[in-house]
Amino acid sequence: MRYKTVALSFVLTLAAAAQAPTAAKPLSILIGHWEGSGKFSATAMSAAGSMASKMDCAWSPQQHYLSCEQTLTDEKGSHQQLTIYTPTETADTFRYYTIAGTSKPFTGEVEVKGDSWTYDNTMEQDGKKTEIRTVNTFSGDEEKFKTEFSVDGGPWTTMLEGSSHRLAK
């Protein structure tokens, strides 16, 4: 009888764990199929133009990671990328790992506060510190995004703005 109780307890624990990843729960907002578009501005870091995107996001089989596959289409053609999100030690910060075609994979962190996601990156360019941030704001099945940069603490310049819509969960 004791063996059955332990086994049943184990099965119930597995069933509860399969329902939703606790630490990664804020990432659930991305689940589904999204389509969108955006406009690049002519800046020191971007050329004027437009882009369209299709993205599909789903939990990994054991629901510890969120996987998003995306196709971006611009004047240069179609580009694919795969991004995996995972929780960090901080409740509202997640690490992402992106593979984009033949480019070198890259990683970073995104801070999730309510319906707002902020990606911050810093790089050295021509001896100057360049900060790049992308803010995604979600409202139901709608997402608005904006990417800006700042050089050596100067003003923020918008290089990309757009929106996406979830078509299916």
Image (cartoon, helix red, strand yellow):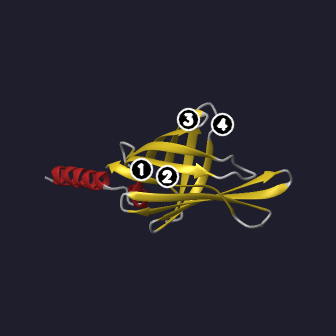
Q: CA distance from mark 2 to mark 4?
A: 20 Å
Q: Is residue 34 left or right of residue 83?
A: left
The residue under label 3 is 79
Q: Real-space Cα distance between discs 1 and 3?
A: 27 Å
Whichever of callouts 3 and 2 sits on the residue coming sooner in the sequence is: 3
Residue 74 on image: x %, y %: 57, 39
Q: Position of residue 105 (x, y in %)?
A: 62, 39
Q: Residues within 10 Å of mark 1 (few under 14, many from 20)?
A: some
Q: The disc labelled 3 sits on which kind of residue?
A: His
- The secondary structure type at the circle numbered 4 is loop
Residue at image coords 44%, 52%: 164
Q: Residues within 10 Å of mark 2 (few under 14, many from 20)?
A: some
Q: Position of residue 82 (x, y in %)?
A: 51, 40
Asked if the residue at tag 1 contacts the one at tag 2, i.e. Cβ–Cβ closer than 8 Å, the answer is yes
On the image, numbered disc 4 is attached to which residue? 104
Q: Type of residue at label 4?
A: Lys
Instruction: Identify whether 14 is placed above or below 76.
Output: below
Q: Which residue in the protein does label 1 denote?
A: 64
The image position of residue 117, as x and y in percent, is 52, 62
Vertical relation: 21 (above or below) 57: below
Q: Is residue 168 left or right of residue 121?
A: left
Viewer-side residue, 47 vs 120: 47
Q: Element type at marker 2?
A: strand
The residue drawn where x is 61% and y is 34% is 76
Q: Quadrant of residue 157?
A: bottom right
Q: Residue furthest left?
A: 1
Residue with the mark numbered 2? 86
Which marked residue is nearer to the observer: mark 2 or mark 4?
4
